[in-house]
Structure formats: C-alpha cells, structure tokens
Image (cartoon, helix red, strand yellow):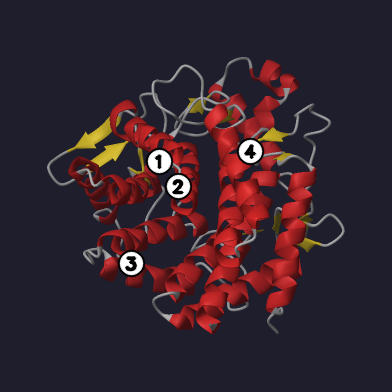
Amino acid sequence: MSAPSREKETILRDLLRSAEEQNYCGYSKFDALNSPYLMALSFHNKWLRLLYTQIVKELPVNIRPVLRVRKSRNPKGIALFARAYFILYEKTGIREYLDKGESLVQWLIQNPSPAQRNLSWGYNFIWQNTIFLQLAFEPNAVVSTFAGEALLHAYRVTKNEVYLNAARSVGDFMINDLPVLHDSESERAIAYVLRDVDAVVLNNQVLTGAYLVKLWKHTGEPEILNVARRQLNYTVNRRTEFFAWYYTEPKEKSPITHDNYHTGGILDGLLEYWEETGDDRYMEVYWRGLRYYQNHLFESDGAPRWMSDKKYPFDIHGSAQGIISFGKAAKHDPSFLRQAMRISDWAIENLYRGRTRDFAYRRGRLFKWNYSLMRWCNAWMARALAELEAVSREMTQ
C-alpha cells in the first residue's frame, strides 16, 4: 500500500531538520582514507588504498569512528540539500526554504576547490578507485556539476546574477580546464578529474553535457550548446543493445556494468536536453532506456537492484535516483508516477529510520547496513522526496 503523501511530506521535512541539526555534516561512502591510520598503512600503494576503501564501504557496521574518520560537509551533498529547499520554495512559496537553500549555495561559492582559475569542487575525502586517485577537495567534473546545478537553480528562483556568473565559471571549468579525452566534429569526452586517465566515464559526459545545456539556456552561447551536444553524443553512441551503458569506455576499466543510479542519471540528462532545447534527437533512446531501467533495475515492489545482473544490495542511492528519474518521466507520461511512488514506498518501509529521522545505507539478502551517510543517503533522498512532492502536486492540481 502506498504511503500517504502527507506522511512523505512529514518524512522529508523531518529529514531536512535532522540534517540541519547536524550542520549537514556526516560520513561518506568512500571516505575510508580520511582515516589517518589507513592512510599510514597504505604505504602509498594504490591497491592497498583501494582495498581499505572497499572494506570500509562494504562492512555492515560503521567502523569510521574507530578509524578516526571525521564527519564533514560534502559539497555534492550540500548542493543536493540546496536543491531540495529550492524545490520546496517553488512549490510552497515559504521564504524559509529559499533562505536555507541560498545559505547552502553561498557556502559552496565561499568554499570551492582551492587554487583553481574557475569555480569547481571535489569530494571531502581522499578517493582511490580503479581509474585514479583523487585528493580531498581536488576538483572533479561530477561534484562541480552538482554544485553548478544548485547555482543555476538559485538563479532561476532569485534572478540574482551572482549565481549565474558563478554557474558560468563552472561551465568554463568543464569546457576549458578538464582534460579532453576524445574530440571530433560530432563527439567529445572529458576526464572526470584534472589528471591523465585511461578511461572515459560515460555517465560523466551526459551529466556535464546536460548541465551545459541548462547554462546555454540562460546565456545563449552557441559554443556551449555545441560542446554539450557532442558530449551527449559520445555516450549515446556507446549504448548497448539494451539501451543502457557500462560505466566506462572501454568497459573493462571498471567492474560496474549496467547499474542502477548511473543509468538513471544518464536518462535524466537525455530528457533534460529535450526539455531545454525542444530537440528530440535523443528521445527514442531515452524512452527505450527508461523501459529497460524500469524492467531490469527495479524489483516489482520498488526495491532498487544493484545491477541488471545482480539483485543485492538494495542501495538507498538507487531508490533516490529511481524516484527522481520516474518523477521526471511522469511529467511527460503520468503512468510513471506509480513507479516513483512504488520506489519511495519501498525506501520508506525498508530504510527510513524514524528515531534518527534519516535513511539507512542499504539492505542485503541477510542483513541491513543500518547506519546513515549524509550525502549518499539523506541528501539524495531529500532531493528525491522534494521532487516527488512537486510532481505529485502538479499532477493533482
């Protein structure tokens, strides 16, 4: 049975109050190397760093306090919380939501990655993955995109040129600062980080491309649109026969195959391109990809599959992404609202923790990771539930 809309609204507001009480500080999924012990014991070895990161991420108990990993603000999480507030302000007109959203965006403007010529942001932890090592707050394309999205959202609701100018600087970071890994008349791909890498992250091209399209909508600069379209082309042209994507090109560079939340993010970007430009060139890929996403990356009760060929663990990030993606789709095909509702109901029933007013990390076949991560769990679900509330209101008015 679907949870009543009023219950979801209460959960969203409790979630935001809980995050505010903690100053939006918390642990992150990949922050194991913020432990001084683990960094010392890694001996500057990539594989040891990767091993420690994976162990801490996969343990069903949170050992970060024992390892002296400190809670802190994650810029991507701050951007997600800001957007949740802006969505609520747009739908309710309550000034408090606007003030809180602007306060978080101002924090982003005041705390970018240091020593960069353009505004950009990175994660608040040292991150080792299979492709690269990134130092804490070293800028990357993904965190910068989410911060830029919050800036553009702030501009849309306030018309304050400060936010648009800051968003334009983020666009310059994407176009001029990040290494270009592929460049042709019809396709372009940029690196995730300011380092030489040997793989293209496919969702990254659509994420940054969709951001540039939104920036173009406000500036009208043809070159921004040209870059955006070529980046979208790169990923669209590398879809599989299922109208889904691997995480990297070449695919062998990452163990991630057709996973949940990266697939949803790519689909959102293709839809946003059409919404901003009126150009439907990607819409067949979008609708076919959305059906694959629905049928192969979610269980019938709304539980988010980890990958198309791997059911567990059910991760809260997959729930949030599904709510957002199907909520966006519902604006153009109302039948998808039921899917967004089903996913939100599952997340609330299985991962919401009423006592602490937050969401648990994930659930496996035999046990639950019964602890919360501020950005991974709560910032994502705040934005997801805010968007669901907004689209639900639109469709019932």
For the residues marked 3 and 2, what is the alpha-carbon distance in whole angstroms?
Answer: 28 Å
Q: Nearer the viewer, mark 3 or mark 1?
A: 1
Mark seen at residue 286:
3
Q: Where is residue 255 in the image (x, y as percent from the top left)?
A: 47, 46
Element at label 4: helix
* Mark drawn on residue 54: 4
In the rendered image, which quarter contains the N terminus? bottom right
Residue 359, x across and y down, in percent: 73, 57
In front: 365, or 341? Answer: 341
Taking the image as drawn, is residue 113 in sight? yes
Question: Which mark is on residue 155?
Answer: 2
Image depth: mark 1 or mark 4 in front: 1
Q: Which of marks 2 and 1 is nearer the N terminus?
A: 2
**Mark 1, residue position:** 164
Whether pointer 4 and pointer 3 mark residues with C-beta atoms closer than 8 Å, the reply is no
Q: Image height check: is 286 above or below 159?
A: below
Is disc 4 surrounded by few (<14), some (14 to 19) or many (20+) residues within 10 Å? some
Q: What residue type is labelled 2?
A: Tyr
Tell me the kind of residue under disc 4: Gln
